[in-house]
Image (tube, rainbow, N blue to C red):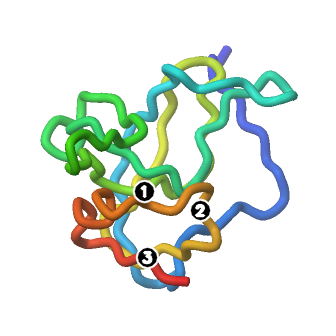
């Protein structure tokens, strides 16, 4: 029996501005510090800015990017919602492309924009 379950909800949220121009990298999304919603699910929303050194070491878990002293460890943008209720889960992180600011949960900081050199944020 599989440990993972899949739930399909109608249309997926799309964060990219141009659907034919982006590059994603497979990552494992961390479940630490994620609060469960009203249904008891821990969902990391699409558009979350991720970091934690995963571009240089893919054995690390993708975590929400952290900014300290004007520098961010941002490395990409989570492409789809990821359910981490049962622990760390696979996801896709955009490392190149155009992200629609209207479609992400929180606007990136200036430090995150600076760190994400191959991602352009557009309205």
Tell which tag, 2 or 1, sits nearer the viewer: 2
Q: Which element is circle 2 on?
A: loop
Q: Is residue 86 left or right of residue 120?
A: right
- List the residue tagged with mark 3: 121
- List the residue tagged with mark 1: 77
Cα distance, mark 2 to mark 3? 10 Å
The one nearer the camera, 89 or 114, is: 114
- In the image, residue 54 sits, relative to residue 112, either above or below, namely above
Cα distance, mark 1 to mark 3? 11 Å
- In the image, residue 105 sits, relative to residue 37, either above or below, namely below
Cα distance, mark 2 to mark 1? 9 Å
- List the residue tagged with mark 2: 104
Q: Are marks 1 and 3 in contact (CB under 8 Å)?
A: no
How crowded is the residue under tag 1: few (<14 C-alpha within 10 Å), some, or many (20+)? many
Q: Quadrant of the C terminus?
A: bottom right
Q: Residue at x 20, y 49 (%)?
A: 71
Q: Residue at x 37, y 36 (%)?
A: 62
Q: Quadrant of residue 115?
A: bottom left
Q: Position of residue 8 (x, y in %)?
A: 79, 47
Tell which tag, 1 or 3, sits nearer the viewer: 3
How crowded is the residue under tag 2: few (<14 C-alpha within 10 Å), some, or many (20+)? many
The one nearer the camera, 18 or 75, is: 75
Q: Are marks 2 and 1 in contact (CB under 8 Å)?
A: yes
Q: Which element is circle 1 on?
A: strand
Q: Position of residue 76 (x, y in %)?
A: 34, 56
Q: Which element is circle 3 on?
A: strand
In the rendered picture of this protein, how many numbered marks are placed on residues? 3
Q: Residue at x 50, y 50 (%)?
A: 48
User: Which residue of the protein is positioned furthest toward the front in this rendering?
Assistant: 69
Q: Earlier in the sequence, mark 1 or mark 3?
A: 1
Q: Earlier in the sequence, mark 2 or mark 3?
A: 2
Q: Earlier in the sequence, mark 2 or mark 1?
A: 1
């Amino acid at each position: 029996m599989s440990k993972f379950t899949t739930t399909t909800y109608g249309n997926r949220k799309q964060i990219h501005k141009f659907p034919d121009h982006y590059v994603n990298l497979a990552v494992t999304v961390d479940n630490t510090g994620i609060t469960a919603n009203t249904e008891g699910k821990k969902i990391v929303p699409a558009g979350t800015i991720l970091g934690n050194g995963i571009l240089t070491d893919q054995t690390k878990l993708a975590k929400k990017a952290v900014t300290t002293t004007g520098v961010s460890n941002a490395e990409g943008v989570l492409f789809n919602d990821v359910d981490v209720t049962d622990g760390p889960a696979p996801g896709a992180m955009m490392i190149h492309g155009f992200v629609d600011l209207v479609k992400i949960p929180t606007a990136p900081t200036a430090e995150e924009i600076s760190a994400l050199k191959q991602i352009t944020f557009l309205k």
